[in-house]
Image (spheres, rainbow, N blue to C red):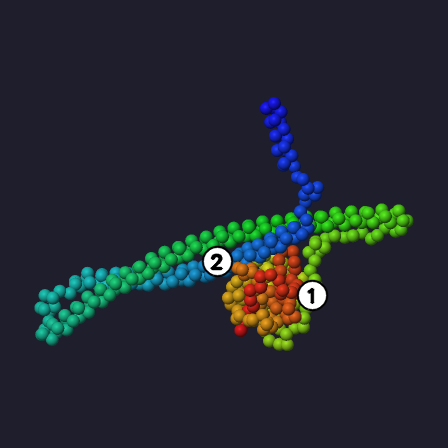
Amino acid sequence: MRRRSSAFLSLLLLASLVPTGVDAAPSRANLQADIDRIETQISTLDEDFNDARLKLSTAERQIRELGLAKQEADRRLAELRQTASQRAAASYRIGAPNMVLVLFGAENFNDFTRRMGLSSRVGDWESGIVTELEIANNRSEAKEAELRAERDRAKALSTSINTKRAQLQRRVDEHQGLIDRLVAQERQRAQASAAAAARAAARRGAPPPPPVVVDASTVRKEPLIAPPPLPASGNARAAVAAGYSKIGTPYQWGGSGPGSFDCSGFTAYAWRAAGVSLPHSSRAQYAATKRVARGDLQPGDLVFFGSPIHHVGMYVGNGNMLDASTYGRPVAVRSIDRRGYVGAGRPGA
């Protein structure tokens, strides 16, 4: 009886592990939701990467500056050591000033007073040299320690960049895998529908329908928005014109052009054509531009999204922006009415 009961319970357990649904595959809506979620993570990691790269660049510049400062401190230290050595040698040759020698060597009281004053000044000078020598030595050692610490920070930052790069690549691979699954599902449904239509046409004696082609664009449809007119004049006109010239250019994380872009690389490229330098980071661009109310937006202004900020586009008018959106989506004109709008900035203002 116990054996039969145990077998019965095992069957119940196995039955509980078998999927009950007929079709366990995720729906297109769920897959699209996953893609949207990963896109946000990709954008955030992309801007983390850009921020880390800016910090590394700053650290490398500071290392160069500290290196120059240390060279100067070492040069001054060497000069003082040489001066002190020369003074020590001279004192050894002539003998240190002695009050008895000063007294007996003086021709009169005024000469004695003059010699005593000179002896005091020589002592003060030697004391000052020693003090300055100690300061220079301490300064050199401090610069060397600061330089080592800065290098350690730069090394840690470089490791962080590589880690974020690997994370981003894994996200991109996952993102592409989901797109491929969506395309495959669309293709299977289209092929099944086409086969059914062909069979129905054959039964009626009608010609078969044209083949249905499914590619990634079938899955990732975006409304095509025509670029609005260029601004009348000024830097903004040059920036927007440079942006328009890159419509259709592919997205690439860390891309700064001219053949591929990420979001902040694209806006920096466009405004560089107008003579305005922007950092390659959406967060840094937000900090580097003058705040503009949404109702006061003008073509060329930058619009920012996310908390923390992880996306930036360039406003072109009519409620639209020009941007490098995310993986798999080329540069295009898109609406600014999307989630996460946090504000706008005007470069060069």
138 relative to 66 in the view: left or right: left
Q: Residue at x 50, y 60 (%)?
A: 54
Residue 38 image position (x, y, % from top left): 60, 53
Q: Which residue sits furthest right?
A: 205
Point out which mark residue 225 bears. Answer: 1
Structural crowding at the residue carrying mark 1, measured as other residues with C-alpha within 10 Å and reported as few (<14), some (14–19) or many (≥20)? few
Q: Which residue is drawn at 52% across and 57% down?
A: 48
Q: In which quarter of the image is the N terminus?
A: top right
Q: In which quarter of the image is residue 337?
A: bottom right
Q: Which residue is drawn at 55% across and 67% down?
A: 343
Q: Quadrant of residue 128?
A: bottom left
Residue 68 image position (x, y, % from top left): 40, 62
For the residue marked with disc 2, what is the amino acid? Leu
Q: Relative to residue 132, is residue 349 depicted above or below?
A: below
Residue 199 image position (x, y, % from top left): 85, 46
Decide which of 184, 145 is in the foreground and name it: 184
User: Count the marks: how many?
Assistant: 2
For label 1, the SS is loop
